Image (cartoon, rainbow, N blue to C red):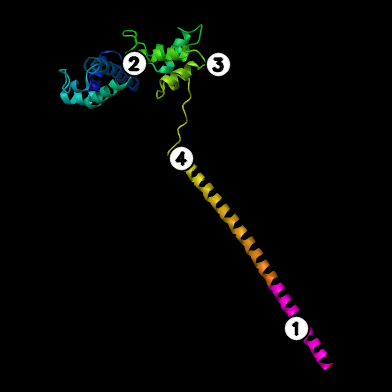
Amino acid sequence: MFGMFVYFECHCQRINQLAIDTDSKPVKEACADLLRTGTRQMRYNLKKLYFNGVPADKVRTTSPLKSMTDDQWRAGGDVDKCAKNALNREKVRFHQMTGSQCYIATTHALKQEKYKDKPPNAIDLFKALHCSSKTGFNESAKEAIAEMESIAAAPVEDGQVSKTTAEVVAQVLPKSKFLQNIGLQLAAPKRSSKAINDARVIELEAEVAAGKQDKEELKDEMETLKKKVEESENERCRLLEETEQLKRAQDETNAFFRCMFSKE
């Protein structure tokens, strides 16, 4: 924090001239709060002077201040991180132009002031939130706005329903979370890895259960067929036995008649 605690005692000594208990907790907290505010302001000014708009390979690695060593500059400024962030910022197409406010806060303020008579649509909010008071729109924002307005103004074919401005913005910015950030589109709930695994387990259990059910049904069908085969075999054996009995009886009858005829 750029020496916040280094200067803490110095600030306490300065206010020691006043009728204040410098050892009390509220006084120390107030001093710490003043130091934090001053530190944030100093970091902001240093960032504005030495990092904003500076190419990643041109960021200073040595301290420009006499009161700060190079090690303190690198440790406090985190030069490597700032250089990486600067490189990442160069890849951003649509920079947020709301200052220190978030999208939701700025959107609420716009609805209370600029759009108090008529609520803004998604395209209106995109324009308002991506327009700098000093430089206006960047080229990427201009191209996106032109495409949005072109789609919104396109005639609707018979039988078709015109797109809402939110749908138009989503079409032009398919990967952007802009609509979600301003509260016009609900974020899809993220499934944790545990939830995904649990769902897969349930799915596999269902498949196994279905497989077992199919197997059981096939087993029952095989048992039924087996019983039918056994019944058919038993019936065949019974008929064969009856046929043999009839044949024996016929042979005995024939033998009896031969014997009778031979006596005559």
Where 213 sits versus 185, above or below?
Answer: below
Q: Which residue is mark 1?
A: 251
Rate crowding at label 4 as few (under 14), some (14 to 19) or many (20 or more) other CA atoms within 10 Å. few
Rate crowding at label 1 as few (under 14), some (14 to 19) or many (20 or more) other CA atoms within 10 Å. few
Work out how far the residue at label 3 is from the one at label 4, CA to CA, in angstroms: 43 Å
Work out how far the residue at label 1 is from the one at label 3, CA to CA, in angstroms: 96 Å
Work out how far the residue at label 2 is from the one at label 3, CA to CA, in angstroms: 33 Å
Q: Is residue 60 left or right of residue 123?
A: left
> What type is the residue that disc 2 sits on?
Ser
Q: Do the numbered discs 2 and 4 sit on residues whose CB atoms are within 8 Å?
A: no
The image position of residue 87, as x and y in percent, is 26, 23
Q: Which residue is mark 2?
A: 140
Mark 2 or mark 3: whose residue is earlier in sequence? 2
The image position of residue 117, as x and y in percent, is 51, 6
> What residue lies at 64% left-to-right and 65% top-to-bottom?
229
Q: Nearer the viewer, mark 2 or mark 3?
A: 3
Residue in front for this viewpoint, 221 or 69: 221
